Image: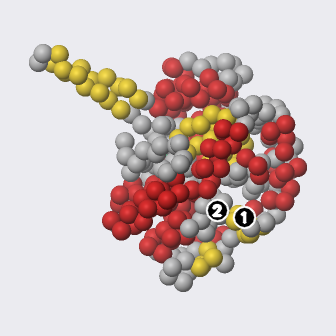
Amino acid sequence: EQPDAGGNTVRLLKINNFLYPPFSADVIEGVPDLEIREDDIIICAYPKAGTHWVWEIARYLLAGATTGVPLAEKDNCMIEWMPASSLDNLPSPRVLNTHLLFRQLPRQVKQKRCKIIYVNRNPKDLAVSCYHHHLKLSQFYNYEGTWDDFLPLFLNGQLDYGSWFDYVKDWEKTVQDNPDVPIYVTSYEKLKQVRYVSSRHGVSWTVRVVKNPVDEITELSQFIGGSSGRCDRQFAARVEEKCSFRSMKSRKGWFDMSNEGEAIMYRKGEVGDWKNWFSVLQNEAMDGYLKQYMSDAKTKFLYDL
Ligand code: A3P
């Protein structure tokens, strides 16, 4: 039971000095020995970085189609939550999810050189999302604290999967030290970002889109390959639409493991919502941590689009 600043507690699982969510208890020790297939794709991300969004995108890209790809009902592909037998029963090619570090993954991921997609998200939006995740899953975490009391838990790495700062740096090192493992690094913001530049010609203006999530999904599809080999932009645009926040929220699937029909995996789906939550002091505290722990990190985060 991890206490927060206000005396509420978060229920966690601690094994070998690493924190896991309570619902990993029955399976976590079997993870290193899980059977992995060469054509598995593994989505890795700190909780709330957009894991399930990228999972959904990857499944469509892999299928080469935006129809006939059913959402798994009340079930998922999270390596450290699901019993091995459920994962074994999934048809190939599988897209598996995890919040684990590279060294905690099943041994065969490295042996079989599975493709890995690592997802980043700016820590301010991520912390806010994490807070709501803990409230919505209060039946597991048994947590009822306020945002003010919760933020220090995030900053001090007192939540499942430990410090976000350590996590991001660990994955940076993984990418650097394992050039033989195919790892594609993407981010929540890249998948959301649309940027325009305008230029003036006499009295008229031209507006150009210079950044678009479809570009990122096209690149992702080239990385994944896919049985039908569909990596064209037109298809990527269809996948982007199908996986938009609105579209995914309106579909039913295992994401709906909610109380009272509220979809827990979809909250706001935006970049910059942190501004509605962080006080000036909290923002300074976060910036202080970033300065202290991340000044040697290479990843640059976008806090606004
Ligand atoms: P917010 O709480 O900021 O809305 P994860 O899958 O890693 O648990 O991440 C959950 C976060 O991703 C939540 O963020 C959720 O709303 C957001 N999300 C889920 N599907 C999304 C989509 N299709 N587009 C954008 N954001 C999405």
Q: Residues within 10 Å of mark 2 (few under 14, many from 20)?
A: some
* Residue at x 67% of width, y 18% of height: 229
Q: CA distance from mark 1 to mark 2?
A: 7 Å
Residue 14 lies, in percent from the top left, at: 74, 69
Establish if 266 lies above or below 94. below
Residue 83 lies, in percent from the top left, at: 82, 55
Between 137 and 45, which is closer to the camera in this rendering?
Answer: 45
Between 81 and 7, which is closer to the camera in this rendering?
Answer: 7
Check disc 2 and report its element: helix, strand or loop: loop
Tags 1 and 2 touching, CB below 8 Å: yes
Residue at the farthest left position: 203
* Residue at x 69% of width, y 24% of height: 226
Location of the C terminus (image quadrant): top left
Establish if 303 lies above or below 202. below
Which residue was labeled with disc 1? 18
* Residue at x 62% of width, y 44% of height: 172
Which residue was labeled with disc 2? 162
